[in-house]
Image (cartoon, rainbow, N blue to C red):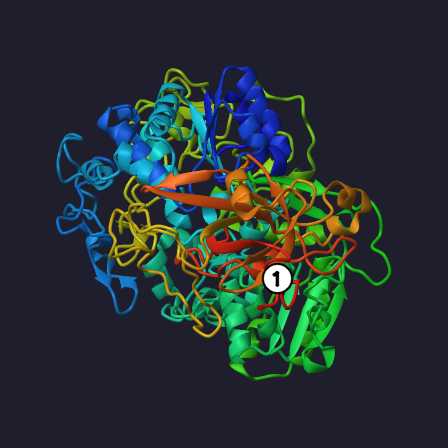
Amino acid sequence: MTNHWIDLQHCKTILVEGSNVAENHPMAFKWIRKAQENGAKIIHVDPRFTRTSAGADVYARIRPGTDAAFLNTMINYILVHKLYDEDFVTTHTNALFLGHADFAFKEGLFSGFDEKMHKYDTGTWGYQLAANGKPRVAASLDDPHCVFAQLKLFVSRYTLPVGERITGIPAAQIQQIAETMAKNRPGAILYALGMTQHTTGVQGIRAFTILQLLLGNVGKPGSGVNALRGEPNVQGACDMGVLNNYMPGYLNYPAHTEPTLAEYTKRNGMGDRKFLVNTLKAFYGDAATPENDFAYAWLPKRSAAKDYGTMAIFESALAGTMKVLWIVGQNPAVTTPNLNMTFEAMAKLEMLVVQEIWETETASFWRRPGVDPKSISTEVVLLPAAFFMEKNGTISNSGGMVQWRYRAVKPPGEAKPDGEIVDLVFRRVRDLVQGSNDPKDESLRKAFWTYTTAEDVLREINGRALRDFPGTGLKAGDLVNRVADLQPDGSTSSGAWIYAGIFGGGVNLSKRRDSGTDPGGLGLYPNFAWTWPNNKRILYNRASCDRHGKPYPGSEPIVWWDEKAKRWSGYDVPDVPVLTDGPNTPNGQRAFHLNPEGVGRLFAAVYQDPDPKNPQFPRDVAYVPKDGPLPEMYEPVESPVENILHPKVKHNPLLKYPRVASHQPIGTVEKYPYVLMTSTVAEHWCGGSSTRNIPWLNELVPEPVIEIPEALARKLKVKTGDRVKVSSARGELLVKAVVTPRMQTLQADGREVTVVWMPYNWGYRGLSTGPSVNHLTIDALDPGAGTQESKACLVNVVKFPESGAPSDAQGGKA
């Protein structure tokens, strides 16, 4: 999230796409309403009409899985009609950079595609470079070789009629939305899992980025691309490295192709090396030295050729190559797509450890309905964990704000906080390997691990000075105050560099609750809790100013160059590399200083920024999406229509599916004529393991249902309350139907497309039970993020009992 919740009040336009924010993020909707009271236009794009739609000024019904086409159509319209912010585009993006002469896109494929390996050689996805290694820059946006021209050519296929044919949104409405966003700036985009749970999820978000950069909607109050996190601490978990491909602070996790710190630096740059060295010092303390590459060798390396995502875990268990699985605070027996395979995989494990506050479906998978417990040999251990109100610690929200929570009551019985459980297990394992000479045990034996409280952990995350720093006030043992305090030579430590300063001056700043101090009246409240990095409330805020450091007209000033003081100043912490480097310096022009180019990326190019101080290593290395430097529209794996843009390349070409042919069938529109989308409901939380144990919430929403359009209900002769059988290529289940105008039949490429909806919050445990929709969903994954395509798969719906009883109403295959 580039901005923060209160900042939404400053928007003049808000596009909500792939989210039902009114129901699932009600506190965010409070600030959307505030913006609306101030005259903002609210746009909601979603296949289903929801409470968010009812509160919007414009509602557009979109066919599931076609977001990239909708966004590219708007981008094309904005470019053709010159509705973009030219000063912002030329100052703060790579629009003028000259692209590689051999870059091409043809019939659904970018240059460099290897069909056999499902992989791109990205050699042509870069820039033309000058002798100093920097990108060559065009004189104007009219240069046919610049990034701007490449983008313009790429999206030119997405005319308004084409956008309508693909998405089902009328061309006039796409035009209306594009013009509304262009004429009412600044504006923000809000999204959730409705955008990410597709096989083109990464590219959909890339399209958001391009749109906002073109409109100059980044870095300003009331702007940005803002992810609405569905769990209170999803942001904090990701910050701390819960994602399998990241270290804490979003550093790329080392792969086997980077056996040394030097190899890691070549691939990731000197900036990431510095932060990794600080993390290694936090991990290993005095044992991490320059002589041993700061213990880099002890860090287990992931195989660059292997997938470590959720589905890969269960596929490994199914194959018998994973023996023990420890699941913390998740309920995959409800939430994982293609559930029948998940259950079979768990039955192949030797041991399953579930760390939870309830005996969930996952903990009791061995005695689910229709299964003989004696047939499952997996040993299941349930570790009773503490609820969030039963433990101290921090929570990080979507805007990066870190707030301390105090324990309200003690955990019941033998339940313990998650951190205490991990601590107990770690210490016991370390005792077992203390005398080992096996190299793989070195990481455990040498780990610096002396925590006794949650605040001890937060201090370690913050980081320390490990020697005196004359002239700075920092002495050995002091907690660092900001990211800039971190050094590359091992003289400081930080468990997660983006949190450096949260314990600045030895004070836990996440405990602050000053809600009265608000410089500029912008709702920043800098003394309320703490926001990463450096207590900055709006990321990229240097981009709120022109090339001379003056705030752009038409938006609220937030930072600026103070010519008299010769430093960047403002109501927020200026997002610049060095506060005293003015706008006339290279540093002062780097509004996106963590990008190697220093600017926002319309084209996600391959690029390594040279480091004059260390010629053998790059200063920074660009991230490039695996499936292309520009966002292309590909159909879902199970789609009711062909891909009209390139019929021979219907799906994402980097897609590898099925990965396990025997367990991953693909349905056809002939057998499964309707599109299923899934989401949560306001009354039940995610997998429902907590909320389905609360009687009054069960009274509000007692069971799962399927929402179907009125036209389909007439065809099936179904009325609200009737039971229907819903089936996909992976399973079937029995639920009641709700006939509603919230769902409508769409027109896509001259064909009627019927979309139905189901919630995913149910399973067979708790006070309220019901079949899980994930028996139906497909586990095809985005090739970059590994996110499943939960929002678009094919199903059939027939009336019950005419259909015949399914073999297992909980989701078994008939």
Q: Nearer the viewer, residue 305 or 450?
A: 305
Q: Is residue 644 left or right of residue 763?
A: left
Above or below, 607 against 667 in this view is above
Relative side of 460 to 146, left or right: right
Tell me the amino acid under the disc marked 1: Pro
Mark 1 lies on a secondary structure that is helix
Where residue 640 appears, x then y in whole percent?
39, 51
Q: In this view, does 414 lie to the left or right of 516?
A: right
Q: Position of residue 405 (x, y in %)?
A: 72, 43
Tell me, yes or no, if residue 507 can be seen here.
Answer: no
Residue 284 in view, yes or no: yes
760, 418: nearer the viewer: 760
- Using the image as rendered, state which of residue 301 and residue 111 is in the foreground: 111
Q: In the rendering, at what x and y percent does residue 495 appear?
A: 56, 54
Which of 516 and 504 lies nearest the eye of the viewer? 516
Residue with the mark numbered 1 = 332
Identified at 55% across, 46% down, the residue is 757
Q: In the orientation shown, which residue stands out farthest toward the right?
A: 413
Q: In this view, does 421 lie above or below 40?
A: below
Q: Which quadrant would the C terminus be assigned to in this image?
A: bottom right
* Residue 760 placement (x, y as % from top left): 61, 51
Above/below status of 712 relative to 418: above
Badge 1 local density, few (<14 within 10 Å), some, or many (20+)?
A: many
Q: Identify which residue is drawn at 36% across, 31% down.
A: 170
